[in-house]
Image (cartoon, grey):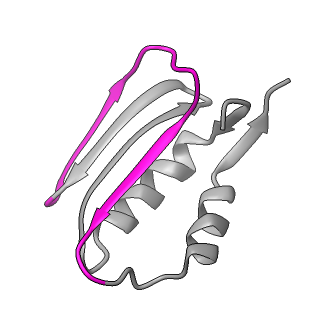
Amino acid sequence: WAELRFDAAQVEPWLQKLAEMPGVQRIKAVLNTNEGWRAYNLSGGANEVLPSNHRRDSRLELIFEGELTMSEDELESQLRSCWCLLID
């Protein structure tokens, strides 16, 4: 994750879509985006996106109750579609 950069225009709507899925209670993330480091906190319809200081790597945490309605492979595939650049 340390060498990845995410496309903010793709990752932000994707996180919002995830937050609306049944059973999802909260999404927390700190991601290196093409618009700088961003901290995401999505919970109960309240979406907060703030600039963040540089981190060692990007992090994503999904907090949900019950079964997630998508497979881990599908989740990873969608996350990968938000990558915009591999950094040397």
Residue 45 falls left or right of residue 17: left
- Where residue 1 sits in the image (x, y, percent)? 66, 38
Picture quadrant where residue 74 is located: bottom right
Picture quadrant where residue 5 is located: top right
Number of marks present in the image shown? 0
Q: Nearer the viewer, residue 74 or 72?
A: 72
Indicate yes or no whether the magenta region holds residue 60: yes
- Residue at (58, 29) in percent of width and height: 57
Quarter in which the C terminus is drawn: top right
Residue 87 falls left or right of residue 72: right
Q: Which residues are magenta?
A: 44-66
Indicate yes or no whether the magenta region holds residue 9: no
| Looking at the image, residue 42 lies above or below residue 30 | below
| Looking at the image, residue 41 lies above or below residue 55 | below
- Residue at (34, 84) in percent of width and height: 67
Residue 41 falls left or right of residue 80: left
Picture quadrant where residue 28 is located: top left
- Where residue 8 sits in the image (x, y, percent)? 53, 40
Q: Nearer the viewer, residue 47 or 76?
A: 76
